[in-house]
Image (cartoon, rainbow, N blue to C red):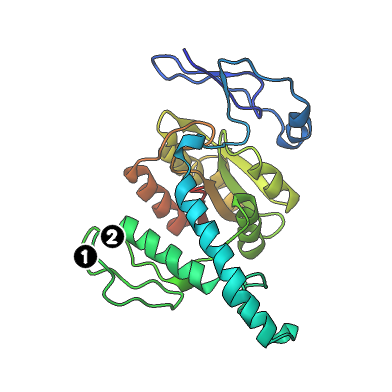
Amino acid sequence: PLRLAHRSLRRPLTLSPTLKINISPTPTLTLSRKMSNLPPLAPDVLDLAKGHPCPALLPHEPMAAACEATAAHLRSDGLRRAQKHPRPSNLKSVSLNYATRPGSARALTALAGFIDRQCNPEPNPNPNPNPNPNPNPNPGAGPRVAPGSLFLTNGVSHGIDLAVTAFARAGDVVLVEDPTYFLSVGIFQGRGLEVVRCATDAGGLDVENLDFSLRSGPLGDALRAGKRIALAYVIPTHHNPLGVTLSAERRRGLIALAREFGFLVLADEA
């Protein structure tokens, strides 16, 4: 069988015909310091330490074309604006200057359109830049995506840190899958959150087990003692490192629990 190695685990994962995965997690912060000193992996082992995609799947040609177009824009329009408005206060529209906090309005508009096309086959009849997405009149389709509902970050770790800053406080509980993305635990602990690992199975997060724990298990006891669950951090699609995708039924169950018990679901779709 193909051997997979995730360097946040003590030994490689072996994918057998029954897809059984044997894991033994170790402390995240200790391992992150040691990862750079690990010996090279054997040729038949795929290194999953950083989650790099296969180079063949990356959009080389579109990215090259975009870079060429941007370079041409900098040489023409950017230089023209710089010569016309030499004062720094007048250079807000130059490509190399700072953007707004949520990100470039042009980029957010393009991203909103892309996400909307992926979720909805019908074109949006009423594009709206407001933060609240437009309701979708088509039954079964996703909500319309508005640029104002999006926020660009410098990667998933930055996004996690911003979410924790905005929606949690030291001493709160954060629920994570066991196992989870190996860098996330260090971010949560660095913000003073109490990390509670939740059981997983072949389908990902065991929502039924989480339901029991919230009502009658240790999590329920913690809630009754005054603890606050701020977030449930999950990786619902192509879980890292399990590789599973959470079913629609389990996703609906998790959302129902979040609404009932008052915590937010932080879905890592990176």
Q: Where does the image place residue 65, in percent across and percent down from the top left?
A: 48, 55
Disc 1 is placed on an element classified as loop
The residue positioned 51% from the left and 52% from the top of the image is 64
Element on which disc 2 rests: loop
Residue 263 visible in the current orientation:
no
Give me the C-alpha separation between circle 1 and circle 2. Answer: 9 Å
Comes first in the chain, label 1 or label 2: 2
Q: Is residue 251 left or right of residue 172?
A: left
Q: Residues within 10 Å of mark 1 (few under 14, many from 20)?
A: few
Which residue is at the front of the view, 221 or 49? 49
Q: Residues within 10 Å of mark 2 (few under 14, many from 20)?
A: some
Left or right, 21 with respect to 125, comes to: right
Residue 189 appears left or right of 226: right
Say whether marks 1 and 2 touch (CB < 8 Å).
Answer: yes
What residue lies at 43% left-to-right and 66% top-to-bottom?
Answer: 110
Query: What residue is shown with label 2?
Result: 120
Q: Quadrant of residue 197?
A: top right
The residue that label 1 is drawn on is 138
